[in-house]
Amino acid sequence: MTTEKRAATATPEALHRIFTIPEAPDSTLGRIEKEISENLAGFLGNHIAATERALTDIEKDFASSAIPEQPSFVSDHTHHLLDKLVSQSVHTSSPSFIGHMTSALPYFILPLSKLMVGLNQNLVKIETSKAFTPLERQVLGMMHRLVYQDSESFYQSWMHSANHSLGAFCSGGTIANLTALWVARNNLLKADGNFKGVAREGLFKALMHYGYQGLAILVSERGHYSLKKSADVLGIGQDSVIAIPTDENNKIDCQLLKEKCQALANKNIKVLSIIGVAGTTETGNVDPLNDMADIAQEFQCHFHVDAAWGGATLLSNKYRSLMHGIERADSVTIDAHKQMYVPMGAGLVVFKNPASVAAIEHHAEYILRKGSKDLGSHTLEGSRSGMAMLVYASLHIISRPGYEMLINHSIEKAHHFADLIDARADFELVTRPELCLLTYRYVPAQVQDALNTADENSQEDINALLDQLTKFIQKRQRENGISFVSRTRIEVAKYNGRKVLVFRVVLANPLTSKAILADILTEQLALAQESKTFLPQLLEMTQ
């Protein structure tokens, strides 16, 4: 085997290397590139530490609305950006930034992004993206096959069909979910006899024609907020997005889901879509997708899976089973800019039936003419960049086994962190990880003992103080700038369903080490001792 082939083999060492840039060009921009790729360490990291400022101060750097009357030299403006923008940007690539779904990027993304921007292809129309259009269709085929596992002959028939589409690239999960529900709405309320369809005649006339009293979208209470925005835009109304309670594992209660479907049917309200969540934003849990598919089939409604976060888990043979039932979905959202390690702006939705997108097909005389292979005829967004190229490159450079290593490592690291939390007497694990998200909080052992025996009123008082302490620790940790975890508020069954404030961590960054995780808990323990109000009150209350 040659050295080149050995270097291309997916190993943990090789995957670690691709997240570190190999060399730095001798220029200001080159140094910035290097520091960004090396997680804002070294020169830039020191620069940030020395100039950390409050948001209100940073706003003063961008306070003028006047457009400059004189041009700047590129070198001068680059230094301006370094001082005012780059130095104050969030360390999203840092291995100790574990609070949100943003991670380090492979080093090859930077030069490929330059190529993508330099070519400046517009994916709306084949006349402005002759090679990028078939590339994007291929990537959609690859992602469709990842979900539905159809035969190669299926993709040879449909992948490049002018009148069909396996899906759509979008700027993110919000537009992907909207596109899925748009397709579902138009297929449900399609042209019929003298009725020209909801796209032509509007929602009111469509409901009148079909005799429905309204439409509803059902999703767990852990569903993403983008779904309400989609319902708003589609004219269905935010109140028509109905949240179904979850069980103690943050998964939708399918019995309650079925009961709600029947109750709506009794009122002649049609369920437009049941939405399964494959990787909830707050806890990373996966709904029982197969059971939800059964219910969607029984009530004859569109079954959509929002797998914006968890969809990449399908690349892991070891953990793919966590997504069981996703292959029965009519549509699936996946964000490549999450666990597929490409930059922001790479969401997509795939449709089981390539013909279903005909319901949203649109044309224009000067562009998107009938019979063309223009991708824009089946997308909400018009002008779009060639982000599919970065997904295409990543799928080839990292490969499926490489992604499997990354995903497996993230999930197993989350389980390790959960074990660390369990092993520390002064921390409470709130949600055990299913993917690579988990929640927990600082609760002194003495306070935990008191919570276990307290009546409901006392429990409420203790948890109210713990909420304040959690907020205090999280804000101080963010301000210190050494590490970052986010916070959220979720219902906890053992506290009678009370919402409690918790730390939320996302362990997708391959450079986050076990030592860093231990240090984060140590830092939080020290920060708790700095509280001069909440911690003393808690300890006094629970003596």
Image: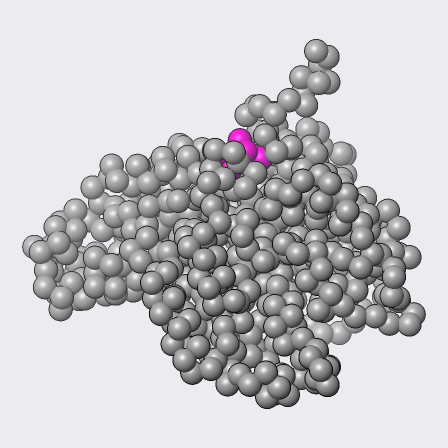
414 is within the stretch colored magenta: no
Q: Is residue 260 above or below residue 12?
A: below
- Front residue of this view, candidates 94 and 400: 400
Question: Which residue is drawn at the image coordinates 31% and 58% (left, top)?
Answer: 247
Where does the image place residue 451, in percent across and percent down from the top left? 14, 56
Q: Main secondary structure of the magenta part?
A: helix
Question: Which residue is drawn at the image coordinates 16% and 46% (left, top)?
Answer: 445
Determine if residue 270 is in view. Answer: yes
Where does the image place residue 175, in percent across and percent down from the top left? 63, 64
Where does the image place residue 432, in percent across and percent down from the top left? 33, 46
- Front residue of this view, candidates 25 and 308: 308
Q: Quadrant of the C terminus?
A: bottom left
Q: Is residue 372 above or below residue 422?
A: below
* Residue 390 relative to residue 47: left or right: right
- Front residue of this view, candidates 96 and 352: 352
Question: Which residue is drawn at the image coordinates 75% and 50% (left, top)?
Answer: 158
- Front residue of this view, candidates 68 and 93: 93
Q: Which residue in the rendered view is the most extreme toward the front?
A: 193
Q: Quadrant of the N terminus?
A: top right
Q: Which residues are magenta?
A: 402-408
